[in-house]
Image: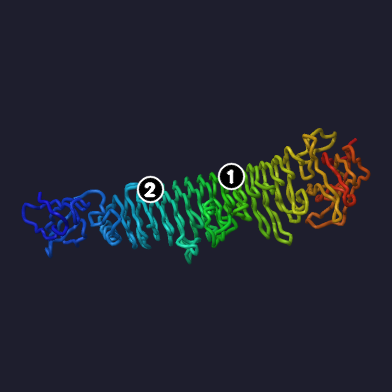
């Protein structure tokens, strides 16, 4: 077989009978990667592509054609694999040829790309992990109208990927030291798979583009917004993203799956759905988050100081679709050390997540929202440890509706606050409706559950919750207790190891122990009991709460209050009666027990004939300023007839 030095020599080597095959030693120099066997095709008329098809002078027909099988090597086309020369035009040339074969493009070494490489058809670029590198400031672009393709096993240092089509797979790649979005999606992106990649040291192009560049994966905001179906981001390692978020999704995304990723040491949020449609659907499932917002400790200043924008998983600023909840489920995620909320957004389902140490450093990185979970439709079976403020929280000026909060374990907060806090902030009366708080265990908070007292309640239920080491079980904006005078129920709630608890002990004959709002005050160690002091402004008040009863005939049902207390002031029990629509009735009854002992706890009984289905109770002191009452037990019983 005849040996030819390089392509230039081959272009001047005329075919003669007997030399149908030749061996070319390199593209330009021996062993530069362009070497290979070429066969003569006497009928060939294809254009010279400078890699697999070579024309001899002006010979037509007749072509030298490379003998090969499998993938195409960039070096055949003259690409330098030492990063010394820009290969943008060469890569475009190779892709154009690969479109016609079709065949995968493989390469080993370092290749400099400073321009735009257009991938227009279903081409596969495959490298060897840590041995195939694309450097520079260029972009590999799957253009609009492309039929997709695959990039696998390539390390991108500086260079990045843009996707404006469907049917694309990016797998087993490394993205490092990129000053833009590593993978940017625009337009319609269906069936896009981002699998088992590593992203490190991804930065915004400037402070001004902090919220639009520097992401690992960025599904951009467009007008009209682009859509995506079957966008899957799976099993990636994302470490050191120095922008607003690691994964940013906007527009309408259906059947999205973000799962089994490790996201840590970020400047901003882990996963962000921003200006997303309420009609979006999918799952954020079984991901691990650590050090979300931790990058802010690097000393980077404006425009992103403080702990804001540091949620592990976030949704907000919704655009389009039918709310109030976005059809994305957040489940099975492990979140540890987060500078703002762990999970925030009107997600349809938030379940089985482990959320620890939110509001991690409120002194140096303050944020008004360091909750474990903020917002959500169904919040169930989550474990929340060391929240910066409330365990589960939602606040709005309007009504709160359709909140189902069940079987969560919330404990050990950094502050006092509430385990579960659904707060209506407006000055006008609003409504809690279709809310269920059930089966939660809340440990170590000031208030186990907080709802605002002045609102109307419609189909609200609180049952089988347990508070441990909490000061108050239910608390409202005006005092303590829960007002369910409009509609609702309270049943079998327990508060352990602290001042307020489910009542226990022997029930007197003919009496039914009442599950509800008036709480038993207990002190197992006999060393701390609640004490209140009267003020000039208002009587001291220990308990405020409300009860709703089924329709009854007035005059034949009673409440018995057994209050164990001592003090220097009179003991006050005040009952305020409301109409069935929640409006205030003119009837107000007060029981004042004067002259209670100031040296020994004494049991005081008050019997009250229930005149309505809706009453509010206050227990405190009616004394003058500076006097006090200290409580040992408050217990209430419900009876439908007087005992014998």
* Relative depth, front residue between 487 and 554: 487
| Mark 1: secondary structure | strand
* Relative depth, front residue between 625 and 225: 625
Residue 423 lies in what quarter of the image?
bottom right
Residue in the image at 82% along x and 34% along y: 507
Q: Is residue 307 visible?
A: yes
User: Exactly how many numbered labels are in the figure?
Assistant: 2
Crowding near the residue tagged with mark 1, few <14, some 14–19, many ≥20 C-alpha atoms within 10 Å: many
Q: Which of the numbered marks, if any, corresponds to residue 147?
A: none
| Side (left or right) of 535 relative to 131 | right
Residue 275 horizontal/vertical position (percent): 53, 61
* Relative depth, front residue between 526 and 394: 526
Q: Considering the image in quadrants, where does the C terminus appear? A: top right
In the picture of the structure, the residue carrying the numbered disc 1 is 356
Look at the picture and state if 48 lies above or below 557: below
Residue 501 horizontal/vertical position (percent): 76, 40
In the picture of the structure, the residue carrying the numbered disc 2 is 172
Residue 102 horizontal/vertical position (percent): 27, 54
Q: Residue furthest front?
A: 299
| Side (left or right) of 459 relative to 361 | right
| Side (left or right) of 112 relative to 184 | left
Residue 110 horizontal/vertical position (percent): 31, 53
Q: Is residue 637 visible?
A: no
* Relative depth, front residue between 511 and 265: 265
Q: Disc 1 or 2, which lies upstream in sequence?
A: 2
Separation of disc 1 and disc 2 at Cα? 30 Å
């Amino acid at each position: 077989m005849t040996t030819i030095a390089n392509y230039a020599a081959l272009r001047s080597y005329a075919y003669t009978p007997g030399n149908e095959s030749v061996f070319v030693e390199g593209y330009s120099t021996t062993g530069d990667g362009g070497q290979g066997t070429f066969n003569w095709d006497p009928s060939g008329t294809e254009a010279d592509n400078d890699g697999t098809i070579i024309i001899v002078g002006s010979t037509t027909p007749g072509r030298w054609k490379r003998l090969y099988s499998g993938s195409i090597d960039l070096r055949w086309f003259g690409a330098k694999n030492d990063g010394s020369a820009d290969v943008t035009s060469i890569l475009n040339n190779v892709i154009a040829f690969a479109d016609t074969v079709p065949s995968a493009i493989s390469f080993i070494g370092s290749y400099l790309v400073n321009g735009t490489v257009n991938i227009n058809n279903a081409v596969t670029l495959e490298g060897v992990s840590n041995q195939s590198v694309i450097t520079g400031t260029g972009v590999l672009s799957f253009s609009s109208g492309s039929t997709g393709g695959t990039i696998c096993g390539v390390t991108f240092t500086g260079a990045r990927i843009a996707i404006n089509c469907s049917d694309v797979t990016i797998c087993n790649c490394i993205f490092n030291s990129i000053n833009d979005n590593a993978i940017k999606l625009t337009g319609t992106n269906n069936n896009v798979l981002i699998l088992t990649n590593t992203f490190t040291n991804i930065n915004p192009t400037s402070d001004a583009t902090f919220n639009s560049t520097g992401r690992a994966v960025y599904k951009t905001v467009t007008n009209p917004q682009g859509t995506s179906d079957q966008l899957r981001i799976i099993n990636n390692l994302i470490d050191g993203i120095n922008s607003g978020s690691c994964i940013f999704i906007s527009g309408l995304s259906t059947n999205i799956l973000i799962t089994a990723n490790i996201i840590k040491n970020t400047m901003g949020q882990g996963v962000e759905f921003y200006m997303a449609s309420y009609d979006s659907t999918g799952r954020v499932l079984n991901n691990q988050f650590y050090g979300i917002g931790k990058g802010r400790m690097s000393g980077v200043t404006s425009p992103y100081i403080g702990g804001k924008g540091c949620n592990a998983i976030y949704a907000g600023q919704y655009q389009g679709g039918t709310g109030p909840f976005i059809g994305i489920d957040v489940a099975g995620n492990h979140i540890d050390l987060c500078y703002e909320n762990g999970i925030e957004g009107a997600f349809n389902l938030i379940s089985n997540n482990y959320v620890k140490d939110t509001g991690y450093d409120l002194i140096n990185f303050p944020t008004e929202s360091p909750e474990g979970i903020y917002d959500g439709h169904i919040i169930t079976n989550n474990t929340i440890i060391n929240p910066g403020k409330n365990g589960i929280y939602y606040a709005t000026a309007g009504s709160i509706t359709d909140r189902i909060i069940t079987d969560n374990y919330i404990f050990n907060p950094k502050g006092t606050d509430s385990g579960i806090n659904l707060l209506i902030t407006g000055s006008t009366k609003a409504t809690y409706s279709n809310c269920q708080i059930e089966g939660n265990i809340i440990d170590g908070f000031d208030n186990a559950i907080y709802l605002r007292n002045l609102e109307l309640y419609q189909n609200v239920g609180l049952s089988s919750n347990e508070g441990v080491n909490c000061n108050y079980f239910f608390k409202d904006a005006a005092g303590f207790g829960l007002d369910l005078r409009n509609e609702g129920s309270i049943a079998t709630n327990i508060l352990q190891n602290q001042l307020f608890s489910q009542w226990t002990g022997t029930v007197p004959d003919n009496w039914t122990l009442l599950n509800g709002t008036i709480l038993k005050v207990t002190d197992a160690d006999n060393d701390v009991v609640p004490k209140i002091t009267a003020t000039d402004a208002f009587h001291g008040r220990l308990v405020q709460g409300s009860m709703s009863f089924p329709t009854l005939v007035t005059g034949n049902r009673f409440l018995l209050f057994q209050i164990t207390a001592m003090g220097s002031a009179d003991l006050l029990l005040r009952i305020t009666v409301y109409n069935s629509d929640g409006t205030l009735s003119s009837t107000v009854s007060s029981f004042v027990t004067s002259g209670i002992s100031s040296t020994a706890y004494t049991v005081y009984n008050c019997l009250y004939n229930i005149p309505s289905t809706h009453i509010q109770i206050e227990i405190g002191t009616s004394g003058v300023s500076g006097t006090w009452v200290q409580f040992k037990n408050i217990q209430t019983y419900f009876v439908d007839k007087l005992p014998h």
